[in-house]
Amino acid sequence: MARHFTQQKLVIASHNPGKVREIVELLAPFGADVISAGDLDLPEPEETGLTFVANAELKAQASMEGSGLAALADDSGLCVNALGGDPGLYSARWAGPSKDFSIAIAAVHEKLQSFDDKSAYFICVLALAWPDGHLETFEGRINGQIVEPARGLNGFGYDPIFIPDGYDITFGEFDPDVKTAIAHRAIAFNQLVKACFE
């Protein structure tokens, strides 16, 4: 059975400002006092897990241990079916040390050139770690298609090349509030909120 969240502070185990902003907005209605791992100068752990769940748990536990506070981590990525699920776990690494996602987007387009199947999905796993070692995980997924060229300046990461099923614009063209409400992170968050915050 899920545990209700009653802590005063919550660490977001991320140094990605776009991701932190989305998570803060999603948690705003619940009054949690939120701070990011970046704000606390916590080191980013090496993501050695072989699944999104393992990496989310690893990051949540590292921030919890480093801060002594409950910590929420997200591991997410773009999985392109024709590429065997790549970039997947390595979505951020495809952007290189400078985290330049134009490099990652160009790599996806180049590798997809010889395939007719452009289907893909974004996945998000959230892990919430309590200081006593209790851990919960939640998963969200949204299906869509890869488009070329990239479109839109909103969002971050691979958003400008991903059109979610049922829409005709990319996440990069969405109003940020609309994207935040429907994307893979929101789906995982809805599960987290129902289990731990409501």
Image (cartoon, rainbow, N blue to C red):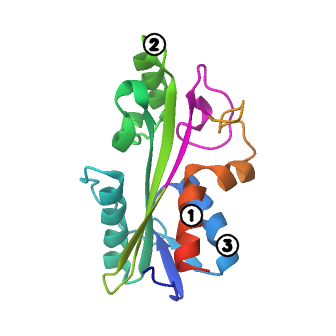
Q: Do the residues labelled 1 and 3 touch (CB within 8 Å)?
A: no
Q: Which mark is residue 189?
A: 1
Q: Say few, some or many: other residues with alpha carbon within 10 Å of mark 3 (under 14 / 14 to 19 / 20 or more).
A: few
Asked if residue 109 is among those painted magenta in the image, a careful observer would answer no
Q: In which quarter of the image is residue 26?
A: bottom right
Which amino acid, by three-letter code, is at mark 2? Gln
**Residue topped by disc 2:** 113
Of the image marks 1 and 3, the number of the one nearer the N terminus: 3
Horizontal side of residue 60 vs 8, given as left or right: left
Question: Residue 87: image x %, image y %?
Answer: 38, 35
Residue drawn at the location 50% of the way across and 78% of the way down:
10
Looking at the image, which residue sits at the far top?
Answer: 114
Q: Is residue 96 visible?
A: no
Question: Residue 69: image x %, image y %?
Answer: 41, 82
Front residue (pair 169, 10): 169
Highlighted magenta segment, given as a residue range: 140-163
Tell me the quarter of the image containing the N terminus: bottom left
Q: Are marks 2 and 3 in contact (CB under 8 Å)?
A: no
Tell me the quarter of the image containing the C terminus: bottom right
Q: Tag 1's secondary structure?
A: helix
Of the image marks 1 and 2, the number of the one nearer the N terminus: 2
Of the image marks 2 and 3, the number of the one nearer the N terminus: 3
Residue drawn at the location 47% of the way across and 74% of the way down:
11
Question: Residue 88: image x %, image y %?
Answer: 38, 40
User: Is residue 68 positioned above or below 34 on the image?
Assistant: below
Which amino acid, by three-letter code, is at mark 3? Ala
Q: In which quarter of the image is residue 149?
A: top right
**Residue topped by disc 3:** 28
Which amino acid, by three-letter code, is at mark 1? Phe
Question: Residue 130: image x %, image y %?
Answer: 39, 81
